[in-house]
Image (cartoon, rainbow, N blue to C red):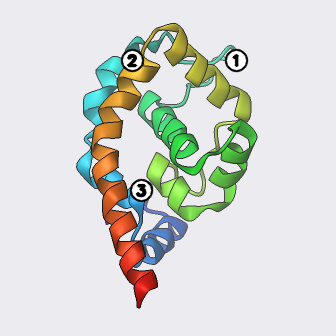
Amino acid sequence: MAFKDTNNTFSDIAVTSRLEKVNSFLKELDSIIDFDKLRPVLNRNGIAKSNVAGAPAYDNVLMFRVLLLQKYYNLFDQATQDALYVNLLFIRFVGLSLEDSVPDESTICRFRNSLLKNRLYDKLFNSVELLANSITIKYIILNSNYFKL
């Protein structure tokens, strides 16, 4: 499986087992992009390490993955939050466990706005877009062949 292992709870093991059988754009994307190499750029976004109440903030790479979900699945903030509660593939792609809390719509919005404010949004998405285009073309070819049968 392309996704990193999360906690080793029984639910995480079941999710991993179920998703091993799934071919998806997200698994391909996760396998060709080293998201940790984006971390130094993401860390320049100006988001604090904790929220106003002192709780740790969501990881920058996790939040960038959330924005990728929005981009590739055409989701607005509330729909993304909802999807992260129920879609196992999305949960695993962003690096959450079933036991983890999900970023709410305002957190997602603030993260995106901080990338825009710090002029990082386009830079990050352009770097990922080149790799994602090759995967998209592969899936279009596979799906068009499938429908010709």
Neighbours of disc 3 within 10 Å: few (<14), some (14-19), many (20+)? many
What kind of element bears circle 1? loop
Q: Quadrant of residue 37?
A: top left
| Residue type indicated by callout 2 | Asn
Residue 19, horizontal then vertical, whole percent: 44, 71
The residue carrying pointer 1 sits among few (fewer than 14), some (14 to 19) or many (20 or more) residues within 10 Å by Cα, namely few
- Residue 24 is situated, as x and y percent measured from the top left of the image, at 41, 65
Residue 17 higher or lower than 106, as above or below: below
Residue linked to disc 2: 43
In this rendering, the count of numbered labels is 3
Identity of the residue drawn at 51% across and 47% down? 72
Going 54% across and 68% down the picture, which residue do you hit? 11
* Screen quadrant of the C terminus: bottom left
Residue receiving disc 1: 53
Callout 2: 10 Å neighbours few (<14), some, many (20+)? some
Element type at mark 3: helix
Query: Regarding mark 2 in the picture, which secondary structure is present there?
Result: helix
Q: Amino acid at mark 1?
A: Ala
Which amino acid, mark 3?
Leu
The answer to whether residue 48 shows anywhere in this view is no
> Does residue 43 show up?
yes
Q: How far apart are labels 2 and 3 at the CA level?
A: 23 Å
Q: Is residue 103 left or right of residue 27?
A: right
| Along the viewing direction, whichever of 14 and 76 lies nearer the viewer | 76
> Marks 2 and 1: which is nearer the front?
2
Residue bearing the label numbered 3: 26
**Whole-percent x and y of residue 109?**
66, 25
